[in-house]
Amino acid sequence: EVQLLESGGGLVQPGGSLRLSCVASGVTFSSYVMNWVRQAPGKGPEWVSGISDSGASTYYADSVKGRFTISRDNSKNTLYLQMNSLRAEDTALYYCAKILAAGTLDMNFDSWGQGTLVTVSS
Amino acid sequence: EIVLTQSPATLSLSPGERATLSCRASQSVSSYLAWYQQKPGQAPRLLIYDASNRATGIPARFSGSGSGTDFTLTISSLEPEDFAVYYCQQRVIWPPLTFGGGTRVEIK
C-alpha cells in the first residue's frame, strides 16, 4: 500500500519561508512523477507544482513560479517544496500526490497524503 | 488556462437515487479528464481517469462519460458513503493542471 506522509507546515509571517517534505513508502518512488496540490479552506484543490521521476524537469503554477521550488531525493523517497516569499493567499492544506502510471506524464493523481497545513499570517 | 465549470453546485438526493454530475471545459480536453471524490477531513480520491476508466477499487456504480468539452459522472444508485464533494480535473494542457469548483452531493 502506498503511503505519503507530509510534514513541515506551520504558521509563518508574510514574506517568510517554509520547507515541506513528503516521504513515500510502499512504492518505487523514483518511477513516478510527483506533485504538490493545495487546498485553501472551503475551496477546491489547486495544483501547485510537479517534478519528473528523475527530478530533471519541474513544473509550476503561475501563482507560485519564482517563489516555490520543488525537488526530490530518490535515495530518501522524499519530495520537497521550498516556499519563499509566502503570502496570505498561500494559506492552505498542502498535499503531495503521486500519479497513476509510472514512467509517464499522465497527471492522474491516484495517491495522496493527508496534507500539511500552511498558515501565512501576521 | 483551461477552466472547468461543474454543475450543479449542490445536488440533493436520497440514497438509492441516481446522481448525474456535469463538468464543462472552456476548450476541448479530449478524453483527458478525471473525477475525484472528497469527504470531510480526507484527501481527494481518484474515481475516474481519462473520462471513463474506473480507478482501482472503485465500485461499478460510478461511471464517467464524455469527450471534448462536456463530461458526466454518474452514480447509478447512491450509497450512504457516496455523499461527498466531487471534483473534475483536466490534464490535456498544463501547466497548469486545473480542477473544477466541485459539486456537493448531499442527503435530501
Image (cartoon, grey):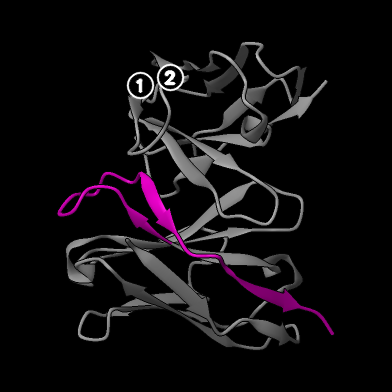
Quarter the N terminus of chain A occupies: bottom left
Which kind of residue does numbered mark 1 sit on?
A: Ser
Q: Is-magenta flag for residue A112?
A: yes
Identity of the residue drawn at 76% across and 51% down:
A42
Q: Is residue A97 above or below residue B55?
A: below
Subunit under mark 2: B
Identity of the residue drawn at 74% across and 82% down:
A14
Mark 2 Cα-neighbour bin, 10 Å: few <14, some 14–19, many ≥20: many
The answer, for residue B101, to whether it is visible in the render is: no
Q: Say left or right for B44 vs B81.
A: left
Subunit under mark 1: B
In this rendered view, identify the residue nearer to me: B104 or B108.
Answer: B108
Where residue B3 sits in the image (x, y, percent)?
56, 32
Where residue A114 sits in the image (x, y, percent)?
55, 65
Examine the image and state in which quarter residue B104 appears: top right
* Residue at mark 2 to residue at mark 1: CA–CA distance: 4 Å
Q: Earlier in the sequence, mark 2 or mark 1?
A: 1
Where residue B17 sits in the image (x, y, percent)?
66, 11
Give, as a single range, the part of the protein colored magenta. A97-122
User: Residue tagged by mark 2?
Assistant: B64
User: Residue tagged by mark 1?
Assistant: B52
> Which element type, helix, strand or loop, lies under badge 2?
strand
In this rendered view, identify the residue nearer to me: B82 or B96.
Answer: B82
Identity of the residue drawn at 18% across and 49% down:
A104
Q: Are marks 2 and 1 in contact (CB under 8 Å)?
A: yes
Q: Is residue B34 above or below residue A22?
A: above
Task: Please tell me how many numbered marks the rendered image carries.
Answer: 2
Residue at mark 2 shares a chain with residue at mark 1:
yes
Q: Is residue A64 above or below residue B98?
A: below
Mark 1 Cα-neighbour bin, 10 Å: few <14, some 14–19, many ≥20: many
